[in-house]
Amino acid sequence: MRTTTYAAGALSLAAVLAFAAPAQAGGWHHHGDDPAQLSVLHGVPGLTVDVWVDGTLTLDDFTPGSLAGPLELAAGDYEIAITAPDAASADNPVIGPVTVDLEEGGNYTAVAHLDADGAPTATLFTNDTKAPRNNNKGKLTVRHVAAAPAVDVLAGGEPVIEGLRNPDEATLKLKAGTISASVAAAGTTAPLIGPADVTVEGGKNTIVYAWGSLADGTLAAAVQVVDLNQGRGRH
């Protein structure tokens, strides 16, 4: 299984410079009293793209499996379009344009991915950042953004999430620790992705994306880690 792991808010300096600098140059990086945070995940196999926000090139030559952000944005509506690489403008998108509404203080991930039938699409997820009362617990969120039928998520060989469909998500509250997780077609146990060890950290939401295409043999997992905020946050 191919697994890519990212920590939202803790990207390497090189990644931050690569993705944040074009955003600042294009006017997409705004500061407010409580700005929204937006990350972008590219989950369309075999397609390098450019990402445009409100007509401004924001992410250039964005490759499959890559995650950008989080970027701080003023609350409001933004139009996101995804084009072929080196497009002169956002006028001929391969995905979108879609309008996203970002609330003040919200934490979001926009995902370019395949729908269940294999057509390119985009989904905006609101990341759950509300901390459990027990500081020793964290959250595990699984998002189905792959061209595949409904799936079950197994932990230790037993289903813990059942019948998850594209583009839905499910969240579990778990004790901090490492679990052996896999993704199987709904009602079965033969892994389509995994098994792989997934670390759930106290005070964090570990978000696992199942992306790619079952028919094309490109299923993979990407992992994003978002901090949970005691006493504030959205869920």
Image (tube, rainbow, N blue to C red):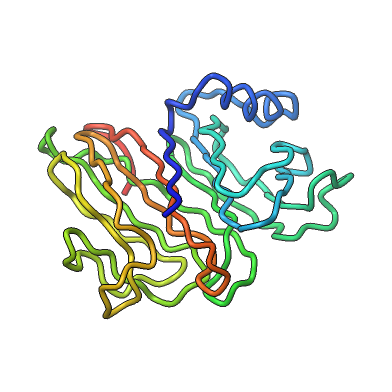
x, y (%) of residue 109? Answer: 49, 46
- Viewer-side residue, 75 vs 10: 10
x, y (%) of residue 97? Answer: 71, 57
The single residue placed furthest to the bottom in the displayed view is 187
Residue 190's place in the image compared with 34, above or below, is below
Q: Is residue 44 left or right of residue 200?
A: right
Q: How many marks?
A: 0
Q: In the figure, residue 199 lies in which quadrant? A: top left
The single residue placed furthest to the right in the displayed view is 88
Residue at image location 22% in from the left, 32% down from the top:
230
Residue 27's place in the image compared with 154, above or below, is above
Residue at image location 58% in from the left, 42% down from the top:
76
Residue at image location 47% in from the left, 56% down from the top:
220
x, y (%) of residue 223? Answer: 40, 45
Q: Is residue 41 left or right of residue 235?
A: right
The single residue placed furthest to the top in the displayed view is 13
Residue at image location 73% in from the left, 44% down from the top:
52
Position of the N terminus by quadrant: bottom left
- Viewer-side residue, 58 vs 201: 201
Q: Is residue 150 left or right of residue 117?
A: left
Residue 76's place in the image compared with 230, above or below, is below
Residue 6's place in the image compared with 9, above or below, is below
x, y (%) of residue 214? Answer: 50, 71
Q: Is residue 153 left or right of residue 145?
A: left
- Viewer-side residue, 129 vs 156: 156
- Viewer-side residue, 168 vs 28: 168
